[in-house]
Amino acid sequence: MLKIMICGRGGSGKSTLVTLLARALAERGKVLVVDTDESNLGLDKMLGLSTPAMTLMGCLGGKPAVREKLLASLQQKGSENTGFFTEDLSLASLPPECTGGEWPLRFLRIGKIERSLEGCACPMGAVARSFLKQLRVDQDEWVLVDTEAGVEHFGRGVVEGVDLVVMVVDPSHEAVLLAGRARALAAGVGKEFVAVLNKVDAVTEPFLRRELSEKGIPVRGAFGFSPEITKANLVGNPLPAGNYREQVKELLASLAI
């Protein structure tokens, strides 16, 4: 029903939140997790899913083929019709070679940096933007988008293809500043923007809530520091989502999901 983009600074817990939400929503319907971070290599392990045989970029012919289509679309008087995907793009029509796992939960990677000196990641951003804008999400279907650290995805236009932006804010001044910037960028394209606190305690949670409130940013949920999740991330095991079932349920309710 919704396409939700999860963003935040590096190490804030974006992939952790994506995993917790994905596990909960998969009990209600189909969930596609989309990895738009060209550097993140462990999200499939966190989800406990198989690694897709190919990235979406690979299914489209690789970076050279994507560049050619982008240049062709620019030559057509700046047309945004890149021709990457068909008009009837849906979860059911996704190529099996670029998705890992089985329904109700599957995983897709836009692209990865494969070698040194291969150039910027802009083609990956263009593919992510086009894919999310054209992907149709039906009843009882959700798309969760895990992004790279910072706000690059706003500049690349990836945000245009989602319905809601969720910012993960951990206890740091940088995270608060970044949240303010991301809120402004989301507002610029008319997207709803909310925050979820992570790794907070009795001291940091009220402080962050006050700081974000002063910036006009609603806080929809809060999670404490988890030794269990830290250990799972350290050794590359699936995250133990069961301990946070009620917190995730409350978060989804606050997001009206």
Image: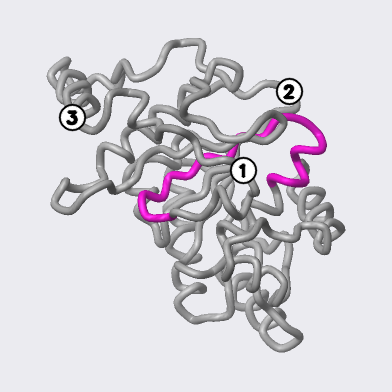
For the point 47% across and 49% down, the residue is 186
Q: Which mark is residue 49?
A: 1
Residue stretch rendered in magenta on the structure:
22-40
Using the rendered image of the protein, determine whether residue 1 is visible from the camera's viewpoint. no
Give amino acid for label 1. Leu
Count of numbered marks? 3
Residue 33 is a magenta residue: yes
For the point 39% across and 28% down, the residue is 130
Residue 253 relative to residue 10: left or right: right
- Structural crowding at the residue carrying mark 1, measured as other residues with C-alpha within 10 Å and reported as few (<14), some (14–19) or many (≥20): some
**Vertical placement of residue 195 versus 54, above or below:** below
The residue tagged 2 is 139
Query: Residue 221: horizontal and vertical position, in percent?
Result: 73, 63
Task: State the CA–CA distance, disc 3 to disc 1.
Answer: 29 Å
Asked which secondary structure carries label 3, the reply is helix
Comparing 45 with 245, the one in front is 45
Residue 54 relative to residue 213: left or right: left
- Judged by depth in the image, the label closer to the viewer, 1 or 2, is 1
The residue tagged 3 is 64
Mark 1 or mark 2, earlier in chain: 1
Task: State the CA–CA distance, disc 1 to disc 2.
Answer: 24 Å
